[in-house]
Image (spheres, rainbow, N blue to C red):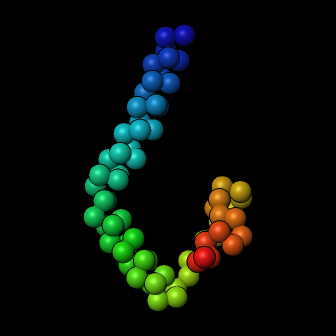
Amino acid sequence: MADLEALVAARFEQSTTVPETFFTTEAGRIAEACWSMARRFHQGGRLLAFGNGAWATDECPGRSEPG
């Protein structure tokens, strides 16, 4: 049982450390991408999101349309 608890603890630590490291490292590039997208949206641009399965996007029809 201790091995299982150690495994769960290690996986939990990894599940928080990896994203934290990524976002800390890439914050500048993410911000640049956000500004670039915002400029394009302001000029009438659109975002096409696609994928496989329900987890591909949580967007509901019409939600992203300007009000």
> Does residue 67 appear to the left or right of 26 in the view shown?
right
* Residue at the image position 52 percent from the left and 85 percent from the top: 45
> Does residue 63 appear to the left or right of 15 in the view shown?
right
The answer to whether 14 is drawn above or below residue 64 in the figure is above
Q: Quadrant of the C terminus?
A: bottom right
Q: Position of residue 56 (x, y in %)?
A: 64, 60
* Residue at the image position 28 percent from the left and 55 percent from the top: 25
Q: Residue furthest top?
A: 1
The answer to whether 59 is drawn above or below residue 37 in the figure is above
> Where on the picture, by quarter, is residue 28?
bottom left
Q: Position of residue 16 (x, y in %)?
A: 41, 38
The answer to whether 66 is drawn above or below residue 14 in the figure is below
Q: Position of residue 23 (x, y in %)?
A: 35, 53
Q: Position of residue 59 (x, y in %)?
A: 65, 64
Q: Quadrant of the N terminus?
A: top right
* Residue at the image position 71 percent from the left and 58 percent from the top: 53
The answer to whether 60 is drawn above or below residue 55 in the figure is below
Identify which residue, 29 or 9, lies in the foreground: 29
Total marks placed: 0
Q: Residue furthest front?
A: 67
> Where on the picture, by quarter, is residue 62?
bottom right
* Residue at the image position 36 percent from the left and 74 percent from the top: 35
